[in-house]
Image (cartoon, rainbow, N blue to C red):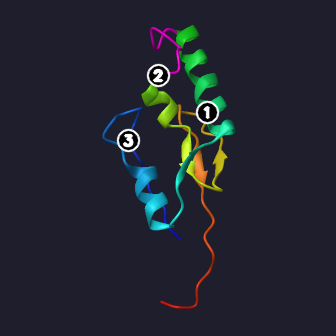
Amino acid sequence: MIFTIGGMGPTVDDMTLAAIAQAINQPLEANKEAIAFVNQKYQEFAKKGYVDDSKMTPAREKMGSLPMGSIPIDNPVGAASAVISKVEESTNC
């Protein structure tokens, strides 16, 4: 089991999910649920005045790219969803 945390926003240097994808041998893919979550959060942030624009930028879209087969989980605080990536169990260690 791996627990990790990435950057605190849509930064170009955050490679957390890319590293996880590589470690579990799954490509990153756009996840419709995760992208919708990010979009909704930025609309909320714009209404509250936390950001100037709710537009989905490439950096924000990146937060919706998850390792293939992963499940996005609600994040009540941030703009990126938490992620569960299941990997086949192995008896070889």
Q: Which residue is mark 3?
A: 7
Rendering coords of residue 37 (x, y %): 64, 31
Looking at the rendering, the stretch of residues picked out in magenta corresponds to: 49-56
Q: Reading the chain from its start, which is encountered first: label 1 or label 2? A: 1
Q: Nearer the viewer, mark 3 or mark 2?
A: 2
Whether 16 is drawn above or below 64: the answer is below
Query: To which residue does mark 1 refer?
Result: 35
* Residue type (three-letter) at the residue carrying disc 1: Ile
Marks 1 and 2 sit apart, C-alpha to C-alpha, by 11 Å
Q: Secondary structure at mark 3?
A: loop
Q: Nearer the viewer, residue 77 or 17?
A: 17
81, above or below 38, in the image: below
Q: Is residue 51 above or below residue 35?
A: above
Q: Name the residue rendered at 60%, 70% in the picture.
A: 87
In reply to whether residue 68 is colored magenta, the answer given is no
Q: Label 1 vs label 3: CA separation?
A: 17 Å
- Residue 70 picture quarter: bottom right
Nearest the camera: 25 or 34?
25
Residue positioned 55% across, 33% down in the render: 77
Which residue is labeled 2 in the image?
57
Q: Earlier in the sequence, mark 1 or mark 3?
A: 3
